[in-house]
């Protein structure tokens, strides 16, 4: 049985011991984080991960409704109240608005309430995930249909970059991006492979990127990127998590979060689409990545098939030992 990580709010010590004993008696393994107020509970929630919140209905700094409104959409909540046993008239800790309660002689009475709360939360969460997935799929289909129209219009009939530009403008708006661009490898005059930006679209007030180097061996993160690209995987970067040299390189353009998706053919990447957020620390969702992957396939079919650029030679992207 997976241990339960519990956030306990404003439960008095004598009742807390009773909760611990009853959970142990029921065969649960668990960890508890105690908070003595609504504000302390909210702080603890943002600092850790919990499976269930168990709170006294009486809080020193507000009602349980306030706490449930803040955390109820993020965490299943079980509200307890101090009362008296309907049989013995002795003190009990009861699950609010139910007949479930716990005292020293009846340790398991409330366990079904705990289990029902967890099951109901899990089912509701799964339902919301399914609905979100369905909405994401519908949204992606609409965006892809619009991009197909763009590449089938006068802008895209000859495979020009104008269609890519229009598709990127659409993505910039619907994904709330700061920048989106297409980079491709190119054999320079000296025979060395370079990475060149072919198309770029930026949000109002966001400057175009200016690369310090087109040589991939001089870009600190590119060897790592190349390994992922060659396996067809996207790159996700949060500026705050990068080593100092990579952090400095990306910080020149105020990048907070970055997603790079390769455009692949026969196990090699031909280009990559870069998406940047200069305002937010952003975890890229599966739906967002899936949409960009679909767009990358469209760009490969409608645009790159007309390009005569060279593919990357992996040996040129590997720093000498």
Image (spheres, rainbow, N blue to C red):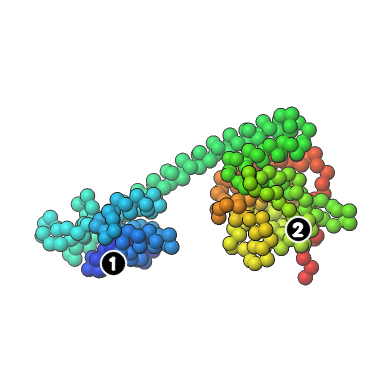
* Residue extending farthest top: 154
* Residue extending farthest front: 205
Q: Secondary structure at mark 2?
A: loop
Residue 283 at what x, y percent from top left? 55, 53
Task: Judge whether 123 appears above or below 240 on screen.
Answer: above
Q: Residue at x 27, y 58 (%)?
A: 59
Q: Are marks 1 and 2 in contact (CB under 8 Å)?
A: no
Q: Residue at x 59, y 58 (%)?
A: 238
Quarter containing the C terminus: bottom right
Alpha carbon distance from label 1 to label 2:
60 Å
Task: Judge whether 1 appears above or below 307 on screen.
Answer: below
Task: Give the image quarter of residue 164.
Answer: top right
Q: Nearer the viewer, residue 254 or 198?
A: 254
Q: Residue at x 71, y 33 (%)?
A: 151
Residue 83 at what x, y percent from top left? 17, 58
* Residue extending farthest right: 190
Residue 294 at what x, y percent from top left? 64, 42
Q: How many marks?
A: 2
Residue count near mark 2 (Cα–Cα under 10 Å), binned few <14, some 14–19, many ≥20: few
Q: Secondary structure at mark 1?
A: helix
Disc 1 target residue: 20
Numbered tag placed on residue 212 in the rendering: 2
Numbered tag placed on residue 240 in the rendering: none
Which comes before the other along the chain, label 1 or label 2?
1
Task: Judge whether 210 appears above or below 307 on screen.
Answer: below
Residue 246 at what x, y percent from top left? 67, 63
**Can residue 224 be seen here?**
no
């Amino acid at each position: 049985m997976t241990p339960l990580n519990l956030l306990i709010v404003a439960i008095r010590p004598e009742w807390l011991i009773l909760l611990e004993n009853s959970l142990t008696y029921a065969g649960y393994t668990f960890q508890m984080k105690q908070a003595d107020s609504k504000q302390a509970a909210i702080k603890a929630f943002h600092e850790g991960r919990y499976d269930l919140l168990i709170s006294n209905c009486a809080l020193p700094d507000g009602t349980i409704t306030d706490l449930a409104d803040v955390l109820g959409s993020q965490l299943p909540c079980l509200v307890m109240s101090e009362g008296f046993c309907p049989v013995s008239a002795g003190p009990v800790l009861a699950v609010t608005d139910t007949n479930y309660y716990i005292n020293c002689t009846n340790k398991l009475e409330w366990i079904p309430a705990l289990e029902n709360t967890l099951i109901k939360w899990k089912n509701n969460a799964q339902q919301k995930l399914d609905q979100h997935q369905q909405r994401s799929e519908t949204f992606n289909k609409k965006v892809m249909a619009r991009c197909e129209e763009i590449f089938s219009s006068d802008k895209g009939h000859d495979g020009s970059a104008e269609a890519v530009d229009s598709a990127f403008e659409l993505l910039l708006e619907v994904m709330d991006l700061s920048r989106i661009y297409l980079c491709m490898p190119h054999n320079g005059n000296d025979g060395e492979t370079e990475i060149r930006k072919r198309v770029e679209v930026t949000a109002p007030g966001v400057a175009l990127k200016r690369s310090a180097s087109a040589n991939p061996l001089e870009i600190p993160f590119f060897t790592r990127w190349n390994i992922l690209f060659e396996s067809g995987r996207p790159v996700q970067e949060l500026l705050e998590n990068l080593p100092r040299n990579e952090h400095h390189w990306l910080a020149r353009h105020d990048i907070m979060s970055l997603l790079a998706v390769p455009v692949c053919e026969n196990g090699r990447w031909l280009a990559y689409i870069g998406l940047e957020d200069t305002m937010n620390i952003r975890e890229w969702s599966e739906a967002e990545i899936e949409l960009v992957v679909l767009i990358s396939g469209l760009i490969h079919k409608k645009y790159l098939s007309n390009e005569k650029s060279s593919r990357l030679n992996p040996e040129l992207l590997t720093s000498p030992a």
